[in-house]
Amino acid sequence: MKQKNLYQGSAKYIASPELLNAVNVSVALNRPLLIKGEPGTGKTMLAQSIAENLGKRLVIWNIKSTTKAQDGLYVYDTVQRLYDSQFGEGDVRDIRRYIKLGKLGEAFVADQRVVLLIDEIDKADIEFPNDLLWELDQMDFSIFETGETIAARHRPIVVITSNAEKELPDAFLRRCIFHYIAFPDEETMHEIIRVHHPDLEQKMVQSAIMAFYRVRELPGLQKRPSTSELLDWVQALVIGGVDPESINSQFPLPGVLLKKDQDMAVLKRRFSTVDESPGKRNLPGFRRV
Amino acid sequence: MFTDFYYTLRREGVQVTITEWLTLMQALKLGLAGDSLTGFYYLARSVLIKTETRYDAYDRAFLKYFAGVETPPQVTDQVLQWLENALPPLKMNPGEKNPSFDWSLDELRRALAERLEKQDGEHHGGSQWIGTGGTSPFGHSGYHPAGVRIGGESVNKSAVKVAGDRAYRDFRTDETLSTRQFELALRRLRLLSTAVEGEKDTLDLDATVDAIGRNAGRLELVWARSRKNRVKLLVLMDSGGSMNPYQRLCSRLFNAANKSTHFRDLQFYYFHNCVYEIIFKDPVCMRRNSLATFEFLRQYGSDYRLIIVGDASMGPGELLRPYGSLDWGADNEEPGINWMRRLAAHFEFSAWLNPIPRAHWKMVEGAYTISALQEVFPMFELTLDGLNECTKALISKKSAKRI
């Protein structure tokens, strides 16, 4: 198979020219690509799209709050080894049998260049990125128990996503190529809906998008709905057989877009005129000091 | 190549390091910028800028260096700072709004440039200068039939135009670094659980070796409970008008605390100047979303750590007199100080964080109430050092001695 090295976006994923550019820069420079953006702007999808477009295998390392940097390198299964020594199974003297490579190790030893996605790096402990500096820079690590060094045969294409839940350390940032995925404008949104649901009625899409942006711009929302929620909502509207005309006036199925009670209350206030009793309203001209 | 651009960036406050700059040079050598300025703009941005909050500074530097296009009047940091100490939005009667269509963009632009030149400080609530809550055409939260809201949004065309649009102005925060520093400080607020609660999920090596020895070599694994942080934290934030100048500082603390995952429980509540018989659940401080303070005390046991964030500055009456509350319709029979004492007595560990620098405590308008509240709570300034001191006070009684 011909190996491509220039990412051009894929059929299911609409990437802006800036994003394409950032991906290609990071591939050419062999630097990790750090992607930030509001939830639901397709950060994780990007890695899948890159893998698909460049014809490479995708290795996903999902980060959780308890993930340690070591987990990505290798795990030494002491307990299994002890048990095996007890029951005389296998060759216990061979420590290598009890070393299991983590996702990063897996990407290093692959016999082809792979795409490694480190998903939601900000979920982990605040020191986590610092612990990976050397490994991502030099693309090797050594296994303490065997004295072996695992070096990347082909430097993987590393994509790191962050929801900005935590600030990342400077030393880590210096080594990355950074791109911020801005929230798509209405035009791009049309495009995105088109690739996901190609045979939708234009009128439905139009009014759904209009209502969606109206909700997003409501002041005081705690969690603004994202692209992926809009996609779900459009689908729900179709399945529910909602009349496109009524979307903007009645706002059906809001639960797909808004996930918080308070946000729902904000929406209700906005879409119906009934409000608090006049006695509780702020007196005009009264200003908090 | 472009070495001046490097210095221009640094002058705009983008701390580009040599490593990053060399990376850019390498990328240029590889021809990654293509042959267009737009290509260079995006290439340099993705290599040099590591957070969207710096996109705006980058745009400004890019504009300066690759000038030759018409530059809009520079809205400098200083102007943005004037706007920060904002008045609450001006409420306008719809009838008074009286839209006027009699204006021209050029004229407005000229006037803005002129005023930027002349204005030398903050102005709020007036009708002429750049400021907030007034009826001047420039600033925000005010009303003018044809005004310029300072802050913008747009899309991209050519490179210099993109920079000119400065679409990322909304993201700028000049202290992103400190959120992380605050977070690190809050991590010290840690009190490990004893070995009697929780799951047994870590291998106790010593006990295992012992057990295997006793079994004459037959395996036996002994598990122990891992130790977890058991600090439960309550944060009470003042959301009164006098706190407006410190909003950014406080929201950084809020973010840092919110992001800390290591607390067993973390709750935020709000008050307006002083705590009375009710405590609010959101910063709007409306009665319908509140909790009786007695209820609050019942709900949270004395093992919660209490941090109060506020400027502690108010009229002495608000703190010391019955019915002293500013709020319309609040019926506080007891003076605020009683409620404060009650809080301090209920929680074993409590502390007050004050955004006003310690050096000013004796001089600001609220000096009287600040010193009165210092009698009740150990008070620290809301800086990195202050926060560190505060976490110590919340962990051990020894350092909680009043200063």
Image (cartoon, coloured by chain):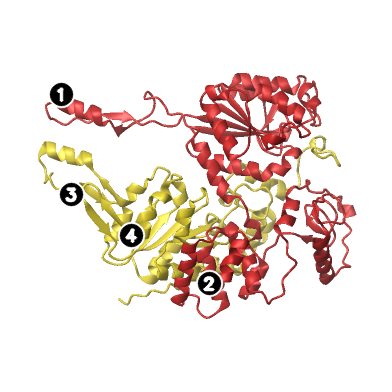
Chain colours: A yellow, B red
The reply to whether residue A203 is in sight is no
- Rendering coords of residue B90 (x, y %): 82, 49
Q: Position of residue B35 (x, y in %)?
A: 52, 81
- Residue A97 - label: 3
Q: Could you say which quadrant of the image residue B281 lies in? A: top right
Whole-angstrom CA distance, mark 1 to mark 4, is: 45 Å
Using the image, tell me which numbered label, if any, was put on residue A17. 2
Amino acid type of disc 2?
Pro
Left or right? Give the position of A202 relative to A115. Answer: right
On the rendered image, what quadrant is the N terminus of chain A found in? bottom left
Tell whether label 3 touches label 1 (CB within 8 Å). Answer: no
| Label 1 element class | helix
Q: Are marks 3 and 2 in contact (CB under 8 Å)?
A: no
Residue beneath disc 1: B214
Query: What residue is drawn where x is 45% and y is 73%?
Result: A8
Mark 4 lies on residue: A139
- Report how far apart the C-alphas of labels 1 and 2 lie in the structure: 68 Å
Marks 3/4: CA–CA distance = 23 Å
Sequence-first tag of 3 and 4: 3
